[in-house]
Amino acid sequence: MATSSARSSPTYWGCRSTRSTASTSPPPRSAGSSPDHGARGCNRSTKGSHDMIEAAMIWNEPNNKSHWDPELDPEWAIYADTVVRAGEAIASVNPAVTRVLGGMSPIDPGWVDRMRGHGALDAVDVIAVHGFPLDWNLWSIHDWPEKIAEIEAVAPEFPIWVTEVGVGSFGAEEVQVFGLNRTAELLIGRAPRIYWYSLFDLPREWGATTRHREAEGSSYYRHFYMGLIREDGTPKPALDHYARVAERMGLMQWFHFEDPRLDEAVRWMKRLGVRQLRTGLSWADSFRPGALDWFDRQMEALADFDVTVTFCFTPEHLGVAPHHTSCAREPQAFADFCAGMIDRYQPAGAPAIAARA
């Protein structure tokens, strides 16, 4: 739920452009220029191998209006062009990085067919799905295998990852325990990658990224109870159950800009035995003062995990509309951001992380 803010002097995020540079792309900056921007040159990492990114997801829930505005792109043609450009850009920097089609929510085989028709599937290696059957979806938790099979039927050549699944404790913490255990039973061994959402409850004062708030009614408040750890830092009963499957079911935890929970999250994940983590790097946040300092700190803190990074959120000043859910006026600018982040944290020559199976 990163917020975007326009700036007259954009942060420089990378060291290359993969196509003709869009007019919105910032010029290269020297390592010593404008310290407010946090620029330190390319490929900064405390790990000599730069082995920080397992996979790159191109947007989050693009068929959900809370994350991509369908009024601006009703056929998802601009999104598909964004995927193609970003997928090519990522591969041009490091072809070993697995490219993931932004986790769809709802799970919709017709939308996957549409993406194939637009050519987007040619630029990705994995298709991802998200599901919350005990909180928002209109299907049973027991239907998880069938929901994956629906996507396999229209895209049999692709692995299907479950990059976000969770059960909230809004109604009762016992429901979350049941949901976690049943999800593990149904998905471990069925999907190559599973990411439980989330480690922490969302603080109430932060607000949830949704454009469905009025339609959700009381269900809106479920957004604040999806964590395994309460806002006050105390564990919920489901945490012990998650610990039993942590090596086989990863976590999805978005870290907000300069998130004070980062170090505590790392301590919890290491204690739990988590291996795989999905998080994000916000294109909108890249224009904040000190953005690269924060990105560096975040990625270095997470270097011991196999990280799937989600690239998303349009800067207000680069969107067709001034909102983070807007498609970009020039999708190549987003592709260049993706390339810059891969070049910085998983450049060519870094050890490949086997994620395609």
Image (cartoon, rainbow, N blue to C red):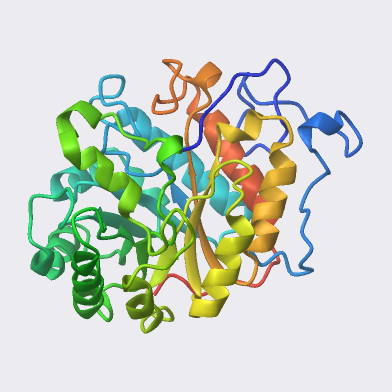
Residue 320, image quadrant: top left
**Looking at the picture, does residue 9 appear above or below residue 266?**
above
Give the left or right position of residue 173, taking residue 289 as reference.
left
Residue extending furthest toward the right = 32
Which part of the image, by quadrant, shows the N terminus? top left
Whether residue 29 appears in this view of the structure is no
**Looking at the picture, does residue 8 appear above or below residue 81?**
above
Image coordinates for residue 336, horizontal then vertical, percent? 60, 37
Q: How many marks?
A: 0
Image coordinates for residue 204, horizontal then vertical, percent? 40, 40
Q: Residue at image x 50%, y 36%?
A: 2
Which part of the image, by quadrant, shows the C terminus? bottom left
Q: Residue at image x 65%, y 29%?
A: 287
**Looking at the picture, does residue 114 appear above or below residue 157?**
above
Whether residue 119 appears in this view of the structure is yes
Give the left or right position of residue 102, taking residue 44 as reference.
left
Image coordinates for residue 209, horizontal then vertical, percent? 37, 36
Image coordinates for residue 192, horizontal then vertical, percent? 34, 74
Give the left or right position of residue 149, taking residue 297 as reference.
left
Q: Residue at image x 70%, y 15%?
A: 8
Give the left or right position of residue 128, taking residue 47 as reference.
left
Which of these two is toward me, 18 or 317? 317
Q: Residue at image x 57%, y 43%?
A: 338
Which of these two is toward me, 286 or 178? 178
